[in-house]
Amino acid sequence: MRGAMKILVRMPNWLGDSVLALPALRSIATNFPGAEVWAAASSHTVELLAFEPSAAGVLEIPEVMTWPSFIRTAKRWREHRFDLTILLTNSFGSALLAALAGIPARWGYAGDGRSILLTKKVSRRARPETPGLSKAPGKRQPEAGCIPGSCPFWEDVLHQSLYYLRLLKSLGLKVPDEPAISVTITPEDEEAAAKQLAAAGVDLTRLKSTGKPLILLNPGAAYGPAKRWPAAKFGQVAAALEKQAGASFVIIGSAKETGIARQVVEAAIAAGTALPPFVLAGKTTLRELIGLMSLADLLVTNDTGPMHLANALRLPIVAIFGPTDPRVTRPWHEPYHILHKPVVCWPCWYRECPYDHRCMEAVTVEEVVNAGLALLGSAPAARAKNKEKEKDE
């Protein structure tokens, strides 16, 4: 005798997209009370869902999928005997994997030649008349989160988080008008992060007792160098905010970004910093990064996955955008400041700039420093307000 209905939600591959898809995952669980909802996630985002209350379990997908691993993954899915899969990814491969796994109901966006593999599909171009989904982006005026003049044309573009919810709405499911994005954090996450900071030389007790901020710098971007603000400028920001706010700095990122981290340190020293930034790039797990963000006061970052992770934790953010569109991938919750220059070639979405990288070079150190100081001044009250709102939700 079969038990509860089993649903597999194929989560996006990138960290930032996975964070933005969390409201969709939770909406699916709400729409199918009593069902057993599982998530399928890439190997580098599995930890994000480790304590996700809406997921009964998580199936890991290899980051690099070969044909043998593809078949093994399909076989593993088949053993779970899922009744339905909802694909938040757009690729042909994700639909083929679900079909080979024998999942009878396969729902998702059409496109990439996979329509024949879907039992229920939605056009990616269609926009249902949904009050929340069609109007939510326009509710947020540039003044709420941008340096004036840096974020034009905010109306009539769908944020990525709403893009996932639009799929569900078009499939006939109920979705929230204004989604809340959050990530579960545990005491163990914070404890592990505190140990990491202590090992790196950061005295949290002293910072708290003196009221000095801990600022995280995220100078990398897995997408490609086009999304990276120059490392030298990150170093100059560190020197300036140390002088003006007494801040201490920790550089985060992947193991592949340790070279960029060293460039930031060198630039900070050249700019006259008394205490160079501490480097934790490549030294933290995803859960430790979550804990680290919970202990920090500000993040200065490119448009990356850690930006969305920090936003889910309500860490104030200075976000520097270049080739991508902040209307689509901006932080969802305040407090944040976006710095963005809509140059003539924007948006290009290139991984590497074939020209002079003018969209990123045009953002000045002074602008980032001023945005950081403004957020540091309002950070305690803003975070306290958001924590109270989270309790109500």
Image (tube, helix red, strand yellow):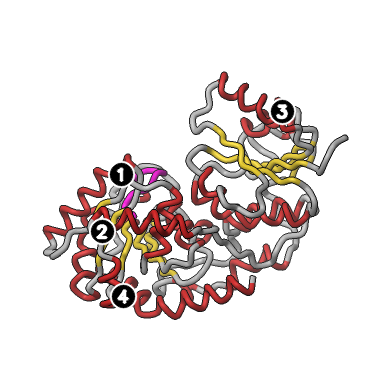
- Kindly report which numbered mark, 2 or 3, lies closer to the viewer in this rendering: 3
Res 377 label: none
The residue carrying mark 3 is 79
Q: Is 141 inside the magenta-drawn segment?
A: no
What secondary structure predominates along the stretch shown in magenta?
loop
Amino acid at circle 1: Glu
Alpha carbon separation for disc pair 2 and 4: 15 Å
Earlier in the chain: of badge 3 and badge 1, it is 3
Asked if 157 appears above or below 122 in the picture, the reply is below
Q: Position of residue 117 (x, y in %)?
A: 74, 31
Helix, strand or loop status at disc 3: helix
| Marker disc for residue 234 | 2
Up-down: is 194 above or below 138? above
Amino acid bearing label 2: Phe
Q: Spatial distance from mark 3 to mark 1, Cα to Cα? A: 38 Å
Q: Name which residue type carries label 3.
A: Glu
Sequence order check, earlier mark of 4 and 1: 1
* Residue range of the region highlighted in magenta in the rendering: 218-226
Q: Secondary structure at mark 2?
A: helix
Q: Which residue is mark 1?
A: 257
Q: Residue at x 43, y 69 (%)?
A: 336
Quadrant position of the C terminus in the picture: bottom right
Question: Can residue 89 be seen in the rendering of this structure?
Answer: no
Residue occupying the point 22% across, 53% down? 264
Q: Secondary structure at mark 1?
A: helix
Mark closer to the chain start, 2 or 4: 2
- Pointer 2 local density, CA inside 10 Å: few below 14, some 14–19, many at least 20: many
Q: Which residue is mark 4?
A: 373
Labels 1 and 2: the sequence-earlier one: 2
